[in-house]
Image (cartoon, grey):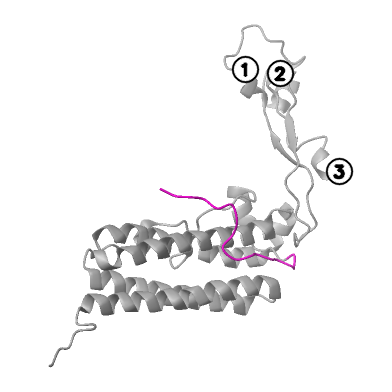
Amino acid sequence: MHSQFKYWKPYVSPYDPCKPIRVKSYSTPPQLYMNFQPPGLPQFQSPKQALMHGTLWPQLYSPYPDPHKRGEKS
Amino acid sequence: MFYYEKKLQYPVRVSQCNPMLAKFLVEQYGGADGELAAALRYMNQRYTIPDKVIGLLNDIAMEEFSHLEMIATMIYKLTKDATPEMMKAAGLGDHYVAHDSALFYNNASGVPWTASYIQAKGDPIADLYEDIAAEEKARATYQWIIDMSDDPDLNDGLKFLREREVIHSLRFREAVEILKDDQGKKKIF
C-alpha cells in the first residue's frame, strides 16, 4: 500500500513574519496508483460500512483530513 | 528571450505576521492597475510603437515583472504559514476554499485578472497616455496599501515600488515628447 499523504519541508527563512509550518503535506489518494481498477477487489464487510466510506472498496478509500497530522508535529 | 537572475530587484522584508495585508497586496498582483497588467500591457504595446520608444516599453515591462515577483514574495511570506483559521480571520476564507495558500491573479475582492484591464490601441499617443495613467493609478494604489499597513519593513519595499511608478510615469511622458518630434529642433512657430 502506498501512503495516503506525502510530507515535505518547505524553506523556512529566519525573517519569516509568521510562526513557520516546518512540514507541509499533500494528499496522494489511491486512484493515483490504480490506473485501471482490477476486477474482484475485496469489499467492505457490510453495505452500511461501504455507505459510510462512500466506496465499496477499502483500497479506494481516501481519508481526509490527514488522520496522522504529521504536518503539525515537529 | 529572458535571462533570469535568481534574486529580487529590491529586498522584501516582512516583519509582522498580518495575513490580512496579503489580501490588500493582491490588488497589485492581479488587479486592474497591478504589476501583471502593467507588464503585459507594455510588453504587448511595444511591437507597434515607433522605434524610438520600443526600448523604453521593453525595459519598463521587464521591470514590472520584477515588481510582480516582489509582490508575490510579500504575499507568499504573509500567507505560507497561515492556518485555515488565520486565513478566515484575515478575510481570506474565500481565497482559501479556492486556492489554499496558493497565489492567484485576482484583485483584493477576488475578481480574477482579465485582459480587458489593458489596451493596445495602436495609436502611439493613445497607448502612451494609457501607460502614464496606469503608472499614476498604480502609484495611488501603493499609497492606499501603505496607508493600510503598519509594518515598517513591508512599507519600505512598497515605498520603493511606489517610487518606481513615479519614474516610469515620467519616462512615458518623455516618450510622448519624443513622439511630438519637435524636440531639439530650432523651430519657429
Label 3, label 1: how far apart the Cα atoms are: 30 Å
Magenta range is: B1-17
**Distance between the alpha carbons at the discs numbered 2 and 3:** 27 Å
Identify the residue at image location x=64%, y=48%: B100
**Is residue A11 one of those drawn in magenta?**
no
Residue flagged by tag 3: what amino acid is it?
A: Lys
Circle 2/circle 3 CB separation < 8 Å: no
Direction bottom: furthest residue: B189
Q: Quadrant of residue B70?
A: bottom right
Tell me which label, 3 or 1, sits earlier in the chain.
1
| Residue named by callout 1 | A34
Assess disc 3: are there few (<14), some (14-19) or many (≥20) residues with their C-alpha within 10 Å of its C-alpha: few
Residue projecting furthest to the left: B189
Residue B108, compared with residue B156, is above or below; it is above
Query: Viewer-proximal residue, B28 or B111?
Result: B28
Tag shown at residue A73? 3
- Residue at 83% x, 35% y is A68
Q: Chain of mark 3?
A: A
| Left or right: residue A61 compared with residue B114 | right
Q: Is residue B7 magenta?
A: yes
Q: Find out whether the residues at labels 1 and 2 contact each other: C-beta distance under 8 Å.
A: yes
**Can residue A28 be seen?**
yes
Q: Secondary structure at mark 2?
A: helix
| Residue B8: x %, y % from top left | 59, 59
**What amino acid does circle 1 point to?**
Met
Question: Are labels 1 and 2 assigned to the same chain?
Answer: yes
Question: Which amino acid, by three-letter code, is at mark 2?
Answer: Gln
Q: Quadrant of the C terminus of chain A?
A: top right
Q: Residue A59 bears which disc, if any?
A: 2
